Image (cartoon, rainbow, N blue to C red):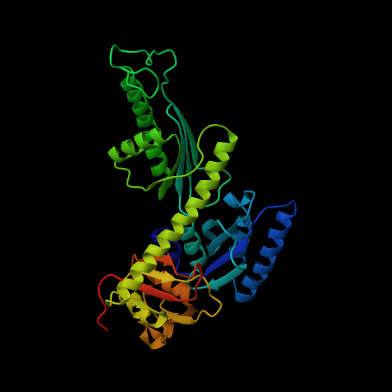
Amino acid sequence: MDLGFLRPLYESGAPVASVHLDTSRGNRDADKEIELRWRHLREELTTLGTDEATLNVLEEAVGGGDSQAFGTHGQSLFASEGRLLSSHTLTEPPRQDRATWSPVPDVLPVAVDRGRHQPFVLVALDRVNAHVTAYPAYPNRGPASERDVTGDSLHGIDVMSRGGPGNLGGYNGRFPGKSVAQDMWRDNTAKVAQHVRDAVAEVDAAVIFVGGDQEAISYLRDNLCERRVDVPILLVAGGRGGPDAEERLHEAAAEALREFVVQGQEHVAAEYHRKLAHDQAVSGTEPTLPMLSEARVRTLLLGAARDREPQLWGSPTEPILVSSHRGDMDDPESAFRAPASALMLRSAVMSDSGFTELRENGEPSGDSGAILRYASHT
């Protein structure tokens, strides 16, 4: 996963307040519950020394934006010097409400959540009509966009008549008009393919899910390949044909998305373990730190379980430096301590490293490691 979207959080040289809280809305008391959670976090931030202007701008943002949507979700907010730096809606609530006031933002919950939920496009398709829906990577009150595409039909066109001796009548037979029908269906899916391409670009989709008529889906695949849409196209159950088919389509797409995300994480984990045997990866926090400080990490792997997370040393002037020893900093006198994940992710962001959540048997892990840009000789 590309961490570039986090880079603006490191532009401020002042301390940053990071807030992660449950903003789920499933009952009439949701607003009051969110207010109480925030009040507790505000008290923590006040104790840590957060200035009033920063607290006030956070309070204005709590529960706002896409986190107002009904359902289960969370929110991550970052602010500094009375200015809101960033707001992210989390597709899952944080494991626990949390607030920090530190020289570096606490971004692990955002990175983990972004990696677990990829943007996608969902297509319900038959030979004449299609419904194309684009979903972003974060919870929203609705999809990013919806497009209904209506193509040409065979209504009023006599394509089923015999064409002479040797031609079989009927839908599955041979008849002169059958190629006319197939050409029409191909033209219809060519129109759909352009809308799918636009939807993919709109949300930077990682995958396309398609349900419906098999022959139309085959034509759609061909058209998308011609348009060089380099996104996996996966078939799911359901499609057009009424509420039941559409409900099956959305349920199948949700399950397929979970599997797609897990498979992506497993693919990176498998590569990580292969490269460990050839000195092209390192395992554990201590071996990873010098690799980050030397900008040698291609992909940082961190687990989301932080119960026993150590404190590390960071530099206010050299953001890629991170170590368990103060003396490794460029200016030990100005060095500061912060949670390991916060400093390791800052280093990864500022050295253009990627990120993947590290899991153990499908559950959040507390481990860390890195795939290197080139082999380690240490």
Q: Quadrant of residue 245?
A: top right
Task: In the rendered view, tell whether residue 236 sits above or below residue 111.
Answer: above
Q: Quadrant of residue 191?
A: top left
Residue 37 % position (x, y): 68, 64
Count of numbered circles in the view? 0
Residue 162's place in the image compared with 369, above or below, is: above
Q: Quadrant of the N terminus?
A: bottom left
x 38%, y 33%: residue: 215
Q: Relative to 166, is 138 on the left or the right?
A: right
Quadrant (top left/top right/bottom left/bottom right) for the C terminus: bottom left
Q: Going by the image, does 363 lie left or right of 71? A: left
In percent of width and height, residue 331 lies at 37, 83
Position of residue 31 measured from the top left corner of the image (x, y, whole percent)? 71, 54
* Residue for point 28% across, 16% down: 166
Q: Nearer the viewer, residue 115 or 31?
A: 115
Residue at 56 percent of width and 77 percent of height: 307
Asked whether 38 or 318 is in front, the reply is 38
The answer to whether residue 195 of the structure is visible from this angle is no
Q: Is residue 308 left or right of residue 192?
A: right
**How far across and down, in percent of the image, does residue 200 sit?**
40, 43
- At a point 60% along the width and 75% down the height, the residue shown is 48
